[in-house]
Image (spheres, helix red, strand yellow):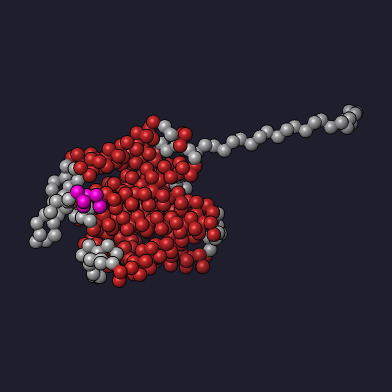
């Protein structure tokens, strides 16, 4: 009974955290005057606290199954680098005037497709592609197009007239979303390889992910800040909002790990997460950052199509080819020694 309750609670935790991630991070970026680097640094600091300090203390005090390995550390660090670059893509999309109401659903719709294709490439299962899986990809693409075309306009800053997005702005937003989709799409398969190389350890790969976030989202931005012209400035509200956004992302990742630890299976855990997070994001965006225009029914229809397509891709993804059955042992020839006589 405990596991039955723990799995849905873990899934709900991730869906809630990832659902509000973009909305909270958007508040941080705006409070920092649309800075691109400062909210990114805060996300890295939040990940460092949750994914490095906490797991490190736990490992030192209690230990865990599995063991360190160079291969596992490298794969896990690569996964963390992909996660950090994906977070940067979100921040860029928001600072280019993208609205979380459509930025995050597009990410959550596209990342599962990239995740599945990457898994297929690693598992060499392209030959097992089925029509339903292809239909899911088409649904994601069609829904994403509807979301972009019928996206609601954002509110203009106080005292300023609303300025529609130029084609260059839309291109920057789409490019930033594509960066996140690709990076977060390869995150899962690479992290899984790291975990398997560490004999199923959960905390060691998470610690490597946190170290990668610190290197890319904290150390690197601090190093390049004197060399780039980044708008914005540190503010208390912006720092707190950005830290909260990073914490939401990290806690959501832990929720996935807990769901698997409590016996959840990827076949339904990930569809529920990627199906629920965009819905939560949409309601949170409309509640805390209502769009300037009324939301078009075609925009909402596009969101639904993206979610359905992502779930279809995850559920009907081709499975890896089964390992060949072991060759039957060749029976030994009968012994030449005569059997003992029956008495």
Res. 259 in view? no
63 versus 325 height, above or below: below
Q: Is residue 110 left or right of residue 4?
A: left
167 versus 33 height, above or below: above
Quadrant (top left/top right/bottom left/bottom right) for the C terminus? top right
The outermost residue toward the top is: 342
Residue 299: % across, % down? 20, 42
Quadrant of the image occupied by residue 304: top left
| Count of numbered tags | 0
Q: Main secondary structure of the magenta part?
A: helix
Q: Is residue 70 left or right of residue 188?
A: right
Quadrant of the image occupied by residue 225: bottom left
- The residue lying at 68 percent from left, 33 percent from top is 328
Q: Is residue 328 left or right of residue 95?
A: right
- The residue lying at 47 percent from left, 48 percent from top is 263
- The residue lying at 11 percent from left, 61 percent from top is 158
- The residue lying at 53 percent from left, 56 percent from top is 71
Res. 142 in view? yes
Residue 74: % across, % down? 49, 58
Residue 200: % across, % down? 53, 53
Q: Which residues are magenta?
A: 167-173
Residue 201 drawn in magenta: no
Q: Nearer the viewer, residue 142 or 175?
A: 175
Q: Nearer the viewer, residue 183 or 297?
A: 183
């Amino acid at each position: 009974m405990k596991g039955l309750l723990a799995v849905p609670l873990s899934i709900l935790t991730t869906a809630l955290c990832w659902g509000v991630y973009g909305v909270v991070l958007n508040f941080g970026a705006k409070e920092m005057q649309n800075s691109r680097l400062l909210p990114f640094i805060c996300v890295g600091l939040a990940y460092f606290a949750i994914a490095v300090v906490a797991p490190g203390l736990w490992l030192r005090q209690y230990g865990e199954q599995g063991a360190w390995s160079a291969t596992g550390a490298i794969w896990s660090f690569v996964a963390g680098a992909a996660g950090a670059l994906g977070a940067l893509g979100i921040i860029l999309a928001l600072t280019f005037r993208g609205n979380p109401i459509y930025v995050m659903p597009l990410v959550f719709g596209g990342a599962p497709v990239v995740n599945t294709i990457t898994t297929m490439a690693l598992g060499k299962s392209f030959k097992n592609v089925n029509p339903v899986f292809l239909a899911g990809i088409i649904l994601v693409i069609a829904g994403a197009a509807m979301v972009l075309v019928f996206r609601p306009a954002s509110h203009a800053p106080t005292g300023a007239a609303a300025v529609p997005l130029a084609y260059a702005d839309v291109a920057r937003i789409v490019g930033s979303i594509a960066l996140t989709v690709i990076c977060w799409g390869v995150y899962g398969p690479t992290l899984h390889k790291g975990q398997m190389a560490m004999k199923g350890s959960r905390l060691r790969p998470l610690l490597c992910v946190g170290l990668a976030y610190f290197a890319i989202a904290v150390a690197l931005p601090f190093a390049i800040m004197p060399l780039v012209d980044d708008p914005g400035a540190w503010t208390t509200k912006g720092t707190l909002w950005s830290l909260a956004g990073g914490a939401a992302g990290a806690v959501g990742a832990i929720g996935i790990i807990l769901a698997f630890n409590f016996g959840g299976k990827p076949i339904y855990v990930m569809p529920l997460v990627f199906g629920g997070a965009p819905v939560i994001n949409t309601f949170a965006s409309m509640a805390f950052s209502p769009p300037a225009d009324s939301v078009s029914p075609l925009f909402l229809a596009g969101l639904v199509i993206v979610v359905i397509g992502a779930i279809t891709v995850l559920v009907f993804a081709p499975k890896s080819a089964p390992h060949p059955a072991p060759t039957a042992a060749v029976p030994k020839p009968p012994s030449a020694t005569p059997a003992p006589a029956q008495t």
